[in-house]
Image (cartoon, rainbow, N blue to C red):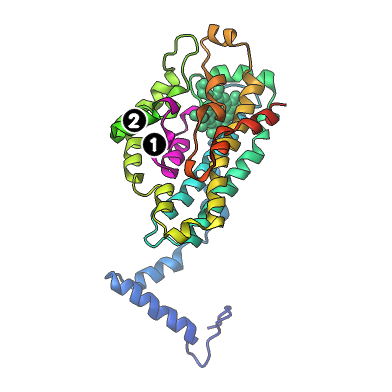
Amino acid sequence: MKHNTNDQLEDGKLPSDIVERIHLLSDKYGAMGQDMKSYLDGLLYADYLTYWDYIHLDVLLSLQNPKTPFEDEKIFIIYHQITELYFKLILNAIRQVANSNNLTIELFIRQLKRCNSYFDNLVNSFEIMIEGMDKEEFLKFRMSLLPASGFQSAQYRMIEICSTDIDNIIAYQYREDLNEEHADMRTKYQYLYWKQGAVELATKKKTLTLKQFEKKYSDDLIDLAQKYEHKNLWVCYQNLSEEDQYNTALINELRQFDVNANVNWPLMHYKSAVRYLQRETKDIAATGGTNWQKYLPPKNQHILFYPSLWSDEEKENWGKRLLKKLLE
Ligand code: HEM
């Protein structure tokens, strides 16, 4: 019989590296009480893997279903989906740090660099939202999407919860009191900073957007916060040796992550809200609009994942300089 492989039979024998692999496979399946021959049959009959099956291309490309006939709505859907996939990559990198049994500074830095490069990509591509859609079309199709909003992105909240102590993402005005009271996680959750957003400007009542989000995700987010109480990125950092905590490369990546998550991305996002939704406050209130103008700017949110890595002056100016530049 003729073999067309690189591993030609020599004197009717299988090459030694193939024999070695068969032994390894036999050990692997044997250890689990499995019959290796059946698995080899499986290999024999299996189809070759294709790119389109592997990445589920048909499914992926079938997930963009506009609610209106406006062409630009597809851009809006796809860019949100792209963002959620990047959020998933960020969570994937954070998880690798949080779940590491033997966390080294190299692993920590490597994963933070990844988080930062994912955020950089999002920040640099946000123009797709800001300039990439026709404003008139946007203002029409968004009415068909109410009350859905990116505000309801659970992964965005998960990134926050996994990145820092919950105390750092509590609304600024409640932070000190809750800290002193040693409130439990469920109580702290009620005072997270984002509960101040998606609120009706005229009545200060929670919007349906916020209520529906809480109904679907609150239990899961509280569970996550409890799981990450002792393994969020800030705890991971504090558990390093004193020498490692002084590592400049690590501190720089943490600071960059803080700026990316809490200034750069929020500002690009804010710019898109300004481009499409900016109106007089009284007009927003009159049409049942939200308090987004006050809520979204990072300088008002006061969210820093790692406050002790910043000077008082840096904290004081959080997001201010960039905001001014961005809106010029
Ligand atoms: C034209 C584009 C966009 C506009 C006009 C816009 C508008 C808004 C507004 C007004 C809010 C405040 C919530 C409210 O008052 O209802 C908000 C929140 C939010 N949006 Fe968008 N958005 C846009 C694109 C995106 C994209 C692409 C994402 C990606 C997932 C996103 C994710 C979010 C998140 C996570 C929040 C909450 C931010 C926070 O709590 O600080 N948005 N958006």
Of callouts 1 and 2, which one flags the residue occurring earlier in the amino acid sequence?
1
Question: Does 268 sit left or right of 178 as displayed?
Answer: right
Q: Is residue 136 above or below residue 251?
A: above
Residue in front for this viewpoint, 243 or 48: 243
Can the viewer see residue 104 in this picture?
Answer: yes
Q: Residues within 10 Å of mark 1 (few under 14, many from 20)?
A: many
Report x, y in % for residue 160: 45, 39
Range of residues picked out in magenta = 150-173
Q: Which mark is residue 167?
A: 1
Q: Residue at x 61, y 24 (%)?
A: 273
Residue at disc 2, secondary structure = helix
Q: Quadrant of ligand 1?
A: top right
Q: Is residue 170 above or below residue 287?
A: below
Amino acid, disc 1? Asp
Q: Residues within 10 Å of mark 2 (few under 14, many from 20)?
A: some
Q: Which residue is mark 2?
A: 178
Amino acid, disc 2? Leu
Question: Does 76 sit left or right of 146 as displayed?
Answer: right
Quarter in which the C terminus is drawn: top right
